[in-house]
Image: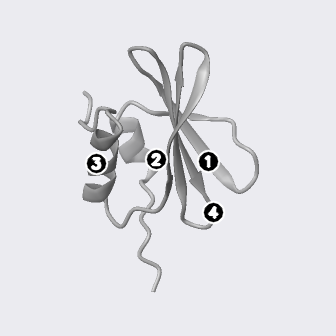
Amino acid sequence: MDSSYQPPAELLAKFGFRSNASPAGQVRYSRPSEVGQETVVLYADGEMTLLEAVNGQMLYCFQGRVASEAELRVLLRQVNWPAEVSG
């Protein structure tokens, strides 16, 4: 049973993420942070990656799957990214 969850574009927009150009098989969303940029990459197979650019260096935060929106919010907090809906 595949229990992976990928956040819809509408939820990511509420978190402040905006869609970016992406290679085939993935969709990228980014938002500015206090020290750089946070990026969520959603893959066609249900996995996701969280990447953070800080002072011009790309940091890898997470790659894997989450099971629900609640788990996504916990993950965002674990990597010190805001998980509140803006606006």
Q: Earlier in the sequence, mark 4 or mark 3?
A: 4
Q: Which mark is residue 73?
A: 3
What's the residue at 32%, 63% (across, down)?
68
Say if 82 sits above or below 36 in the image. below
Sequence order check, earlier mark of 1 and 4: 1
Q: Mark 1 packing: few (<14 Cα in 10 Å), some, or many (20+)?
A: some
- Residue 48 position in % (x across, y down): 53, 54
Is the residue under label 2 in contact with that under label 1 (CB below 8 Å)?
yes
Q: CA distance from mark 2 to mark 3?
A: 15 Å
In the picture as drawn, the residue positioned furthest to the right comes out as 24
The image quadrant that residue 28 belongs to is top right
Q: Relative to 81, does residue 63 appear above or below in the rendering?
A: below
Compared with 17, 28 (above or below) is below
Look at label 2 and name its amino acid. Ala
Of mark 1 and mark 2, the one earlier in the sequence is 2
Mark 3: few, some, or many residues within 10 Å (few <14, many ≥20)? some
Residue that carries the numbered disc 4 in the rendered image: 44
SS assignment at label 3: helix
Q: What residue is pinned by disc 1?
A: 27
Q: Reading the chain from its start, which is encountered first: label 2 or label 3?
A: 2
Q: What type is the residue that disc 1 sits on?
A: Val
Tell me the quadrant of the picture where the C terminus can be found: top left
* Tag 1 and tag 4, C-beta contact below 8 Å: no
